[in-house]
Amino acid sequence: MTPQTPQDRLIFALDVPDLDRAVDHIKTLGDSVGCFKVGLELFIRAGVDAIRAVRDHSDAAVFLDLKLHDIPVTVERAVTAAREHGVQFLTVHCGGGEAMVQAALKAAGGTTQILGVTVLTSMTGRDLDPAWGYSDGLTVHELVMDRVLMGRDLGLTGFVCSGEEVEDIKKQSGGPLLTVVPGIRLADGTVTGDDQSRITTPTDAIQRGADYLVVGRPIRDAKDPQDAARRIVDEIAHALKA
Ligand SMILES: O=c1ccn([C@@H]2O[C@H](COP(=O)(O)O)[C@@H](O)[C@H]2O)c(=O)[nH]1
């Protein structure tokens, strides 16, 4: 799914604790963003009603960000269910292994775009401790690239990564892979000191080649979320022209 307009490229993370708040955001931001992301918090609280709410109150796409990581048959059945709910994007962890990724792709059937989560944007090199099974000296950048290239060979065509890795993914993959980039923080630093580690501004991410930006708190916690979203779309448009 290739984004057509700057607005298409902006995905708002509906990280809120109830459906009423989600609907408020969908109504306010439906004209400013291209996609709403339903993540773990909202899905556990509201279930598929959250997906229906996006559909009922906007024309935006739905991204179900459950980061599936389970045995192949469980993932296959979960992806089938998500596909039946008509979600456009769904995440699986690249670290779940070959059979799991293949099961996800088979169940998605080309209808739902499966995105491989490479290394969470909250993680740094310190998280890749050999005590957790990572090779000694492995960097986050290397692990992201390994997962992208292995995932691509299995048939994955889209990945979640930080803005720091986008350029190399585009250069080294040798094909049109989609990159979806969370960890977006604005140059004015309105959201700081949080759990994200590998952060980029909208301009940096787009100029490095990101296809989609995932933005949560910088919009959700802004005084005027609609204005914040529109400014980000303008920034995306400007970066694309540059
Ligand atoms: O590596 C990842 C994968 C997913 N996310 C999700 O994106 C949003 C980011 O929200 P902010 O408030 O803008 O930090 C959130 O829903 C995460 O679950 C990610 O951040 N990093």
Image (cartoon, grey):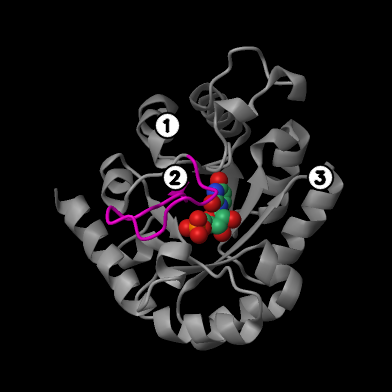
| Residue at x 33%, y 45% (from the top left corner) | 205
Ligand 1 positioned in quadrant: bottom right
Q: Nearer the viewer, residue 98 or 223?
A: 223
Residue 122 versus residue 169 in the image, above or below: below
Q: Callout 3, which amino acid?
A: Asp
Is residue 41 within the magenta segment?
no
* Residue 30 seen anywhere in this rendered image of the structure: no
The CA distance from mark 3 to mark 2 is: 23 Å
The percent coordinates of residue 70 (x first, y second) are 81, 45
Pick whichever of labels 3 and 1 is earlier in the sequence.
3
Q: In the image, which disc is placed on residue 169?
A: 1
Magenta extent: 180-197
Query: Which quarter of the image is occupied by the N terminus?
Result: bottom left
Residue 98 versus residue 13 in the image, above or below: above
Provide the major secondary structure of the magenta segment: loop
Q: Callout 2, which amino acid?
A: Thr
Residue 239 versus residue 208 in the image, above or below: below
Residue named by callout 3: 70
The CA distance from mark 2 to mark 1 is: 8 Å
Answer few, some or many: residues within 10 Å of disc 3's Cα (few below 14, many 20 plus, some between 14 and 19). Answer: some
* Residue 218 seen anywhere in this rendered image of the structure: yes
The percent coordinates of residue 181 (x first, y second) are 44, 48
* Residue at disc 3, secondary structure: loop
Q: Callout 1, which amino acid?
A: Ile
Q: Nearer the viewer, residue 18 or 60?
A: 18
Q: Nearer the viewer, residue 92 or 142?
A: 142
The CA distance from mark 3 to mark 1 is: 26 Å
The percent coordinates of residue 201 (x first, y second) are 32, 49
Residue named by callout 2: 179
Quarter assignment of residue 40: bottom right
* Residue at disc 1, secondary structure: helix
Q: Is residue 25 left or right of residue 10?
A: right
